[in-house]
Amino acid sequence: MRILSLVGATVLAAGLAACGGEATSAAPQAVSADAQTLRAHLEFLASDALEGRDTGSRGHEIAAQYIASEFKKLGLEPAGDDDTYYQRIRFRRSSLVEGSATMVVDTGDNQVELEYGKEFLTGPSAYAEQTEVTAPVVFVGYGLVSEEFGLNDYANVDVDGKIVMMVSGRPADLPSEEGAHLNSSKTKFAAERGAVGIINLHTPMREEVRPFKVSAMYQRAPSVTWVNADGEPNLAYKNLTGSAYVDFAAAEPLFVNAAISMDEVFAQLEKGEQPKPFELGVSVTLKRASEHEEITSPNVAAILPGSDPELRDEYVLYTAHSDHIGMTQDLSQDDHINNGAMDNASGVSVLLETARMFVEADTQPKRSILFLSVTAEERGLLGADYFAHYPTVPLQQIVANVNLDMPVLLYDFADVIAFGSTHSTLGESVAEAAGQYGIELSEDPMPEQAIFTRSDHYPFVKKGVPAVFLMTGFTAKGEDENGGEIWGQFFAEHYHRPSDQPSLPINYEAGVVFTNINYEIGQTIANDAERPRWLPDSFFANLD
């Protein structure tokens, strides 16, 4: 999973006290998850031998082979390419050539060159090895467009052939999930209007959350995108030739000819006002050199055919990402392997055990079940996004996505959180399934994280597929455990670190309950006469 603000999440989690009282026991069912099987899957997938399962690595290939082998052992039908379990994806890994990035502001009277790494940042191009663009600059506020929320930061300005400059972030009054979706669409909005470059302005408000120098620390990491059969990178927008992230402390030259000063813009932001677009009266030259490397990595997919002659051509999709972040470069640590036990060996283990339960159940589901282990989640949900663009079954026949990403199985949880449950009828399925095990469905305790837009279900949501994503809640069953504190401690001390490994005090019996709930969710969806539907007032019901 990709979490933005660990500090905020940790503080919130630690502040939630555990509720006492034992949950009622669920009636026994014909098939149940097995703790030892979950443990066996997790300990293999999170073992040192797989070296952190980075996208394109030998360790991840081994993980993919293990998952495919388990699918084959269960007798599931291959759902990859060419009658295999694998959907092999080509990726382009792009790196910025050291010392190649330049940004020059032409005010008409002077040319001001900003210093890379201290005053501006940029990333590599996924398209070209050499890029250079010179164009006038237009300020476009937050750079957002939404008819539903009355936003059009491109109103009354022409940005065709120009560089747009926008402030980082989004208006505070936007709902978190909807705002996160719009924020992720800024590049799309600019490209569709003919812009040739984007400058993101780091604001004083952003500095309080994430200092510019912190962003600079991660600037030299390569970027990864999938490429299609013609070798074209996904969503890199050819017309956007240049990009830069500029610290407000160095941005004054961009405003020297503007009718509105930079301080006035920041004052508007502080008041919660929406800055209007305007011409800046300067031009900017952005130049960089990039290096490209091609890697490949597979999704792994399998199908359990449905039993109903009419509904078997519809699919309930389970997803879990099999990749993690590989080896750490921090030589100060003795352990360099990011094992990813909770992130996401636990989710893949739940997926595999869920598949076994479906196969061994007394009755087969009416709809078909599609099990999909995706790669490159840590690189930006890329494996799921590729499958959403190139599904191996008709996309319109995928009725729902149940996503399994990083269940923190470290305590005996008494509630679950279902991201997406308020947007579709899947919320009813989750509540019903959890209730069978005496587990409550709680509201999202971290709305500012907008997690509904930040895991592998999101590419399917953007394609119109209702989705739900379960996480262990912050309430523990026993008075001797504080679920919120345990959850928060995990993120503070182990998330994306080598210590996220099988030696953690993993509660596999809690994993059994979590798996059983996810199985019941799928059973409900698969056997319901009606397919899940978006709620009429959901923002995500009618995405482009």
Image (cartoon, helix red, strand yellow):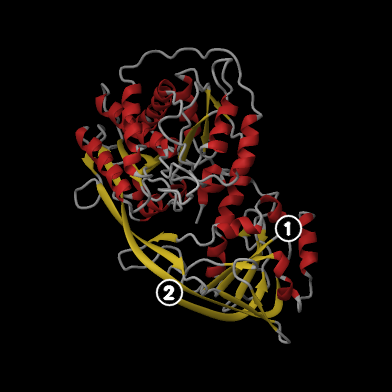
Mark 2 or mark 1: whose residue is earlier in sequence: 2
Residue identifier under label 2: 128
Front-lying residue, 141 or 15: 15
The answer to whether residue 417 is left or right of residue 126 is right
Numbered-mark total: 2
Measuring 40% from the left and 23% from the top, which residue is drawn there? 508
Locate residue 77, reporting x and y percent: 21, 40
Q: Do the residues labelled 2 and 1 touch (CB within 8 Å)?
A: no
Residue 474 shows in the view = no
Within 10 Å of the Cα at label 1, are there few (<14), some (14-19), or many (20+) other Cα atoms?
Answer: some
- Where, by quadrant of the figure, is residue 404 drawn? top left
The residue positioned farthest toward the bottom in the image shown: 109
Residue 290 shows in the view = yes
Locate residue 291, reporting x and y percent: 41, 70
Front-lying residue, 360 or 423: 360
Q: What element carries label 1?
A: helix
Locate residue 54, reporting x and y percent: 38, 49
- Please tell me whether residue 139 is drawn above or below residue 407 in the rendered image: below
Residue identifier under label 1: 204
Q: What element carries label 2?
A: loop
Front-lying residue, 502 or 208: 502
The answer to whether residue 61 is left or right of residue 232 is left
Locate residue 39, reporting x and y percent: 35, 27
